Each structure stands twice: as structure tokens, then as C-alpha cells.
Image (spheres, helix red, strand yellow):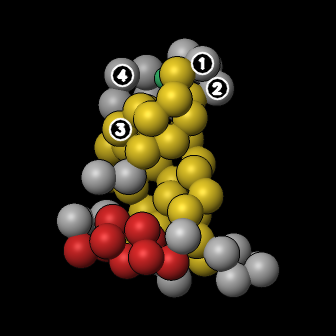
């Protein structure tokens, strides 16, 4: 499950609904989704390992 920081709720580790995993220009990985509770778009940087794991867990691969 991909998690991130919601700027609206000021809450860490929130679950992202329908997360997409993107690759940044610098070669890093990023999860992008919506906070389940409030619908705000949440982005989270992640390692390659975590990105691949999130894709295996059902996140959409967008790279
Ligand atoms: Zn939120």
C-alpha cells in the first residue's frame, strides 16, 4: 500500500486511493494518489524497491 503526507490533514502515512507510481526526471520514484479520507492529491517519494513493491500490491505502473 502506498502512503504519503497529506498537506490538508497534516497527517503522515495516509493511505492513497488508486495510487500511481511515477518516475521522476532524476530517476527517483514517486507515488501519486488521493487521500482516502479527504480526496486531496498526495505525492510521496519512494525508493525503487518500494515502488516495485507498490506496483506488485496493485498500484498503477505509470513509468
Ligand atoms: Zn487528507
Q: Position of residue 43 (x, y in %)?
A: 59, 48
Q: Which residue is mark 3?
A: 15
Label 2: few (<14), some (14–19) or many (≥20) C-alpha neighbours in 10 Å = few
Q: Nearer the viewer, residue 30 or 39?
A: 30
Q: Please tell me whether mark 4 sits on a helix, a strand or a loop.
A: loop
Dot 4 beta carbon under 8 Å from ligand 1: yes
Mark 3 or mark 1, earlier in chain: 1
Spatial CA distance of label 1 from label 2 is 5 Å
> Which residue lies under the disc numbered 2?
7
Q: CA distance from mark 4 to mark 1?
A: 12 Å
Q: Is residue 43 left or right of residue 61?
A: right
Q: Are the residues flagged by discs 4 and 1 in contact, CB closer than 8 Å?
A: no
Callouts 1 and 2 close, C-beta under 8 Å: yes
Q: Residues within 10 Å of mark 4 (few under 14, many from 20)?
A: few
The numbered dot on residue 10 is: 1
Sequence-first tag of 4 and 2:
2
The kind of secondary structure element at disc 2 is loop
- Beta carbon at label 2 within 8 Å of ligand 1: yes
First of labels 4, 1 by sequence position: 1
Sequence order check, earlier mark of 3 and 4: 3
At 43% from the left and 21% from the top, the residue drawn is 38
Figure check: 41 above or below 57: above
Q: Is residue 22 visible?
A: no
For ligand 1, tell me if the residue under mark 3 lies within 8 Å.
Answer: no
Task: Name the outermost residue toward the top.
Answer: 9
Mark 3–mark 4 Cα distance, whole angstroms, equals 9 Å
Amino acid at each position: 500500500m502506498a502512503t504519503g503526507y497529506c498537506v490538508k490533514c497534516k497527517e503522515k502515512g495516509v493511505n492513497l486511493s488508486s495510487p500511481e507510481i511515477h518516475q521522476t526526471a532524476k530517476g527517483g520514484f514517486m507515488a501519486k494518489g488521493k487521500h482516502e479520507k479527504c480526496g486531496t492529491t498526495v505525492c510521496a517519494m519512494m525508493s525503487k524497491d518500494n515502488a516495485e513493491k507498490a506496483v506488485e500490491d496493485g498500484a498503477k505502473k505509470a513509468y
